[in-house]
Image (cartoon, rainbow, N blue to C red):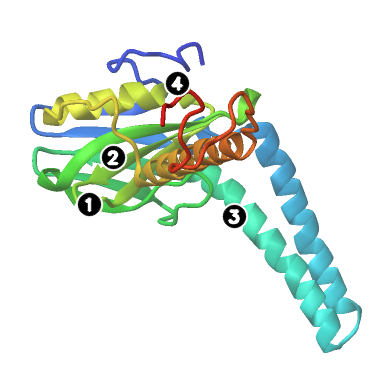
Amino acid sequence: MDNIFSQDPNDLEPFKVTETPDELVIKIPWHTNSNRKDDGFTLLFGIGALITGIVVMNLQEGFLVTLVGGFFALVGVLLSMQVFVNIFNTTTITVTQDHITTRNWPFPFTATFGADNARIPISDLKQVVTEYYAFGGEDASTLMQLITHRGKAYKVFQFKKTVGLAKPLEQRIETFIGLADDPNAVSPRQAQAQKFLTHMENEEVLDAVTTLLDNDTSTDKPKKRPDTPDDDSTL
């Protein structure tokens, strides 16, 4: 995808965007965000685990055999379902002047990409924020969230292959509803992390000052008792 790092809010391919004066609809097919190679390995592993579980459960009767076989079968089913969700699921973001709605279909659960099903009044929406995770190389991702005035965060989508489209998508939504962008806005999780780091930095500074004072062994001039007169004082 040539425009994977596009910064143009009007160019959101491969997402499907429909806009009228009253409604903005953005559809994000999950397959545009998944890695086909990884999905292939996951599906093979899932099918292998499922077959292993079935074979183990049919070897002989017994609680332990059934438990082990059932575990492998469950892992196989979950991994295979994850691949089907990545291929067929779509997150739809619907924005009007009254509400912003996020919906995952046909599988309603959030699965691997982190997308909440939510309906938020525009009057309760404080900011749309994007949170960048840099793990290096292809592991980088961006999580877009809706932050309410009550401090609640709703995950819209976690962009991986399309990581560069998160910020333009945020701008497109904010422009449609007339929401001024706050470059300093962060998610509650980020705010807590920043507060913790600030606390740790303050603790480190305090420890450094304390250590410096404890190690102060200056002997340029001995300390005098308050009631001891100076040597050059007159009686």
Q: Which residue is mark 1?
A: 119
- SS at circle 2: strand
Measure how far apart labels 4 and 2 are at the Cα level.
18 Å
Q: Amino acid at mark 3?
A: Met
Is label 4 or label 2 in front?
Answer: 4
Answer with mark 3 or mark 1, whichever residue precedes in sequence: 3
* Image: 165 above or below 85: above
Q: Residue, x 63% and y 28% (percent of image)? A: 218
Q: Depth-wise, is mark 1 or mark 2 nearer the camera?
A: 1
Q: Secondary structure at mark 4?
A: helix
**Residue bearing mark 3:** 81
Q: Quadrant of residue 234?
A: top left
Q: Nearer the viewer, mark 3 or mark 1?
A: 1
Q: Where in the figure is residue 51, as x and y percent of width and height?
A: 80, 62
In depth, the one of 76 and 181 nearer the eye is 181
Specify which label sits upstream in the sequence, 4 or 2.
2
Q: Residue furthest bottom?
A: 62
Closer to the N terminus: mark 1 or mark 4?
1
The label on residue 164 is 4
Structural crowding at the residue carrying mark 2, measured as other residues with C-alpha within 10 Å and reported as few (<14), some (14–19) or many (≥20): many
Q: Nearer the viewer, mark 4 or mark 3?
A: 4
